Image (cartoon, rainbow, N blue to C red):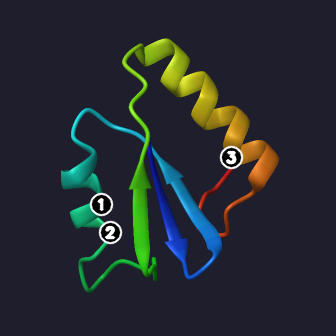
Amino acid sequence: MYFLYDNDDLVYIGQGWNCLLRIAEHTRKDSDKVFTHWSFHPVPNELERKALEKELRAKLKPKFNRI
């Protein structure tokens, strides 16, 4: 899982098999996501990763995630 931040604010939570590639996609000029830094947290089990992503999105409500 990866997390995008704009200064101290969490603005996006995502996941994928290649998080670095996904983060790079968010830097394209047609992306609406503005962020200053990111972090990565490995969750090897896909079912756990999807459940955790859904839970964190619902709880933290990052502004660029759609629920």
Residue 26, numbered label: 2
Q: CB of mark 2 within 8 Å of CB of mark 1? A: yes
Residue underneath mark 3: 57
Relative to residue 9, is residue 13 drawn left or right?
left
Tell me how far mark 3 sits from mark 1, CA to CA. 17 Å
- Residue at 48% from the left image edge and 64% from the top image edge: 4
Relative to residue 44, is residue 55 drawn left or right?
right
- Residue at 32% from the left image edge and 69% from the top image edge: 26
- Residue at 28% from the left image edge and 46% from the top image edge: 19
Tell me how far mark 3 sits from mark 2, CA to CA. 17 Å
Q: Earlier in the sequence, mark 3 or mark 2?
A: 2
What's the amino acid at mark 1?
Answer: Ile
Q: CB of mark 3 within 8 Å of CB of mark 1? A: no
* Mark 3 Cα-neighbour bin, 10 Å: few <14, some 14–19, many ≥20: some
Q: Is residue 14 above or below residue 31?
A: above
Residue 23, numbered label: 1
What's the amino acid at mark 3?
Answer: Arg
Tell me how far mark 2 sits from mark 1, CA to CA. 5 Å
Q: Is residue 66 above or below residue 50?
A: below
Q: Quadrant of the N terminus?
A: top left
